[in-house]
Every structure is written in structure tokens, then in C-alpha cells.
Image (cartoon, rainbow, N blue to C red):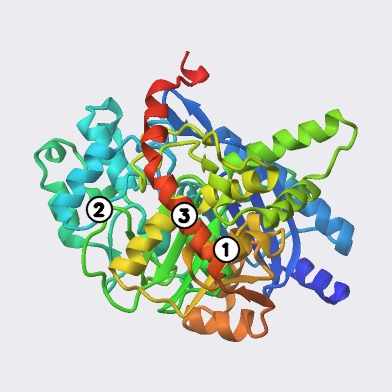
Amino acid sequence: MDLKKNAAAIEAGRTALGLELGSTNIKMVLVNEACETLASTSYGWENQLENGIWTYDLAKVWLGIEDAFHSLTADVQSRYHVEIKTIGSIGVSAMMHGYLPFDKTGKQLAPFRTWRNNITGESAAKLTELFGFNIPQRWSIAHLYQAILNGEEHVKDIAFLTTLAGYVHWQLSGEKVLGIGDASGMFPIDEQTGTYDAAMMEAFDGLDEVKRYPWKLADILPKPLRAGKTAGQLTKEGAWLLDPTGKLQPGALMAPPEGDAGTGMVATNAVRKRTGNISVGTSAFSMNVLDAPLKAVHRDIDIVTTPDGAPVAMVHTNNCSSDLNAWVQLFGEFAELIGHGQTPAKLYRTLFEVSQRADRDAGGLLNYSCLSGENITDVETGRPLFVRAPHSHMNLANFMLAQLYGCFAPLKIGMDILVKEEGVQTDVMIAQGGLFKTPVIGQQVLADCLGLPITVMETAGEGGPWGMAVLAVFAKWHGEKALADFLDDEVFHNPESSTLLPTEEGRLGCQKFIAAYRAGLTVEREAGKAVADPADA
């Protein structure tokens, strides 16, 4: 890239900022008009389990955002010798779904209930039956209705209900809006109108237990916006939240705030019909853009939308790499103790590579990576669990392959419903996430697990923050085009990618592992009941 040209673009504000609040990191990516990354940074944070609720303190949202922006400005200063004083457009993304209610004064009424919580089983089941449409436990409407069924005092005072991305966008711009993809994880969307399904909203408002509240659902939900629309401007107060030094000027165009699923689709150029992508991290999900409606309602398949409003079949798992990361950290501690400390990148590469020597069924070893509950496998309370039989083949290679299989197992079970029962086909399936920073290994295991060719792009490790920056560029300079055409013509015209096919040996080995995994799920379910969490003591 031309440093002088990019320095001039930064000074002139011909840039876009993507901000994403993920499960373990708050990330920022600054790009130019060509969607080339100019600088990036991140701030680590973690959810907490408090009083049985997985949550984040909103005060830490702003600490993290301020820290990340400060680091970004320092990175820009060191690279380009200019300051960030103005930005062309900004986009906010975050973990989808969850529950963030506020009263008319803007006061938070309940702790943020994240997508990770499995506490809305009753409401999700009742709403699915009422609507004839699958309502997952993590959706905002399921959390709202469960709070109503629980008789929670704060519900009567709700004036605004939103997601984490919607909240941050509101604070930066003053606008109570939401990208249509993120909105589709709050309440079902009507593809034709681009807003919430009117008949379902009327059915919800008509429930006897809902009628007693002073609000209507339409009055408290954010307005959905398709990608490319203007979603307000960065206010003076919002600029101060990003940059308390006062150097950043207000006025940046705000793109519709999106969920991490939508930004993942953009980052992998998977928004056209019959395309699909898989994102893996703390959680995992596959997004399959439909060219026809599903034949049946499936409790393990969510119907959401792309950022421009096309219907998507989503398989979402609450757990993926958290348990794997914990084991890698443990091996790292051992390496330190024997005087051979390793960088995280070297640790992951070494441990992933040894899995290539494993028996393809992982030698009879099993790993359940359930840090939290898992809807697809009916695990109510998570307890990470490693299991082996007396005659299992226990070695490091098999252990690591069992870890990788355990990461992908719930996703495999959900995808089997979509592929085998519904016959959904995709022309391309693109994977992204930090797990693929180590080349080939995770990609091949995923291909073997799903029995599908898996493509990884050079942006596999960039993911959502970059995808959100791309949406901000789209809203600022290209909103008149179709999103899919913009991505093809302006962003991915010459992508670097690699595709791996499933191997027969790997596919059969994974099938054997999954069969044993399914048979042992009773143990995982019982572990959640029998093994106490020290945090609950």
C-alpha cells in the first residue's frame, strides 16, 4: 500500500472504522475506501457468570472501546505519522441476540443477558408454538417473554430493548436503530417489508400476560435498517466516548449496526443465495443463504437474514473453542515450568500439527467442549468434559484431534439437519475465525466433520471487525449498489483463498467419533447436574 496516499486519506477522513464487541475481544479495524486495512487493534475482555447469568458489565464496554481506540490512534501515528481527527464512516458490530432493556431515561433495567444463557426454555417453546416459527432461547424476544413469565418487576418500565451493537450505536449516534441481520435475532423479520413480522407482533401483543404492560412491542424495539442505509451520524458525545482527548471530530456517517453473524458473512463474501459461511470462536455458527423456504420448523435451525435482508438458515452453537483454549493454556504453563516457554501462536501451531498423526477417530477419546449449556445437544448446564475408556488410545495426537472434533461436534449435528433433512445446498462454504490462523489443520478437520469442501480466505483471522468496516464503506460510498455486487466488484475481485476437500479416512473417522459423542451425551447432561460450579458456592 502507498503510505503517503493512505496518510492523506486518514487526514481527510476518507476512511471507515469497524468496531466489533466479540466474546473475548473488542476489536477495531480502520480501512481506506478500497477496504484495505490501515490499522487494527483489540482489547481483551471476558464474560462473567453472575447469579446464574452470563453477562458483561456495560462500564467495561466503554473502557474497552476507549482503550482500543487509543491503541488504534497510536498505531496510526506510528505507521503514517498523522492523527485521526475525522473518520468518514463508522460501523458497530457485536455478539448477536441477548437482552438489554432500558427505561425512558436511558437507565439499564437488568444485567445484560448474553446469547450464552440457556434460561428461556419455557418462553422459547411457547413462542415457537404461537408463531409457527422457531424462536431460539438466545433471541431477545425469548428473554423478554421469559422475564414476563418470571414476573420480573423491571418489565413494566421498559422503553427500549436492544442488542449490544444497538446499544453502542445508540450511545454514539443517539439513534435507536439496528441492522436488519441483528434485528432478525431480536424478532422474526418479514423479508418483503424489511421490518418485523406484523402478524407475529400482533400475536405477541395479544397474549394475556403481555396485555397488562403499558408498551407495545413495536414501541420498544429498534428500527431495522438494511445495509447501505444511513443510520445517523457520530455525535459530539459519541466522539468523546471513543476519544476522550477531544481530537476526534463528530459527523462520521454511522452504518446500520450489525451482529457478528452478519459481519462474518460480509467478511467471507457469503451474502448471495446458495452461499454459506462458518464462523468459529467462543461460539460457532454456519450461515446458509436460502434460495427457497425450509419445509419444516426445526428447533435447531434459526431463520435470520443477511445484512441486506435475505433469509438465512443459521446453525448456532453456544460452545466451540473455549475448552480448547483452556487446554492450550495448560500446555503453555507446562512449557514455562520446564524452561521452554512458547508464544501462543507457536503453541497452537505445534499442538494442532501433532493432531495430524492421530487415529482418525481420535483413538476412542471424547471431549465435550461445553463451557455453557448447548441447545442443539440438549445440554442445559455446561461442564467441559474429557472422557476415555480403559482401552482408548491415549496420546497427545489423539487428545488434540478429540479437542478439535469436540469444538465442531454440535455444529456437525445441527448441519446434518439442514443438509440431510432439508436438502439445503450451498455452492461455496467459507470458514473464518482465529482457529484457522494455523493453516490447513482446523480447515481439514472441519471439512472432514461436515463432509463438505471448506474454503478459507486470507482474511480468515480478520473476521467481523473488518466485515463491519466494509459495511461502513458500503454505507458511505456505495449504498446505491446491491451488497453482493459491491462485495464482488469492489472488495473480493481478486481474493486469495484455499479450499480443502474432505478425505474419506477423515470423514469416516469423524463419523465414528460423532456416534460415540452422541451416545455419551447423557454423561455430559448429568455432569451439569452433579458437578457443582465453585462460583455457585
Q: Which mark is residue 512?
A: 3
Marked residue nearer the N-terminal end (2 or 3): 2
Foreground label between 2 and 3: 3
Residue 100 visible: no
Q: Residue furthest front?
A: 391
Q: Residue furthest top?
A: 537
Q: Which element carries disc 3, helix, strand or loop?
A: helix
Q: Which mark is residue 171?
A: none
- Image coordinates of residue 299 in percent, x first then y, are 27, 53
Residue 220 visible: yes
Foreground label between 2 and 1: 1
**Residue shown at 36% from the left, 68% from the top:** 419
The kind of residue on which mark 1 rests is Met
**Residue 402 against residue 438 in the figure, above or below:** above
The kind of residue on which mark 2 rests is Ala
State which quarter of the image contains the N terminus.
Answer: bottom right
**Label 2 to label 1: alpha-carbon separation:** 27 Å
Q: Nearer the viewer, residue 507 or 38?
A: 507
Residue at the spot of label 2: 218
